[in-house]
Image (spheres, grey):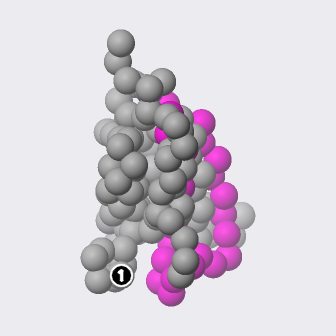
Amino acid sequence: MHYHQAVRIGNRVETSGQGGWDDDWQFPDSLEDEIVRAFDNVERTLATAGATWRDVVHVNSYHLPEADGFIGETHNRVMVEQFRKRMGDRAPIWTETGVPALGAPGMRVEIRVTAIVEAARPR
C-alpha cells in the first residue's frame, strides 16, 4: 500500500496505526484479545526502529465504539492495563477517538504512537 510501518528521524520514532491482526491478517473474536494484539504489533513495529514501549510518549488510539456515545468500558480498561504493563510507571499522552470504521473489515481498534528513544531511557 506504499507506506512505512515506522519512521525514525534522529531519536524520534513515528509509527503508522497498528491493529490487532495476526500474521495472516485475521482478527480475534474477543475485543480484549484484539487490543492486546494491537499493542503487540505496536511493539514489533517500534522494535524495527530501535524503540520500545518504554520510549513511547504519545498514543493516538481509534476505536469502534461498543455503544452509541461511548467508546466503551472494555476499550478503556484494556488500553490502561496494557499501558501499565508495557510502560510501567510512565504514562503517555493519550488521545482516544471513536470512529465509524477502520482500515480493515472486522477491525475494532488501531493504535499509533510517537516514541523519543533517548528521553525514556533510564539514566
* Range covered by the magenta-colored residues: 90-116
Three-letter residue code for mark 1? Trp
Residue 98 on the magenta segment:
yes
Look at the picture and state if 110 lies above or below 11: below
Numbered disc 1: secondary structure: loop
Which residue reaches farthest top? 123
* Image coords of residue 88 (percent x, y): 35, 29
Position of 101 relative to 52 (above/below):
below
Q: Name the residue rendered at 60%, 51% in the picture.
A: 60
- Residue found at the very far right of the displayed protein: 69
Residue situated furthest front in the rendering: 10
Q: Which residue is mark 1?
A: 25
Picture residue at 52% right of the left edge, 37% below the top:
10
Residue closer to the observer: 33 or 118: 118
95 left or right, relative to 37: right
Residue 76 visible somewhere in the drawing: no
x then y, percent, for residue 89: 39, 25
Residue 51 sits above or below residue 46 on the image? above
At horizontal 32% and vertical 39% (from top left) the residue drawn is: 85
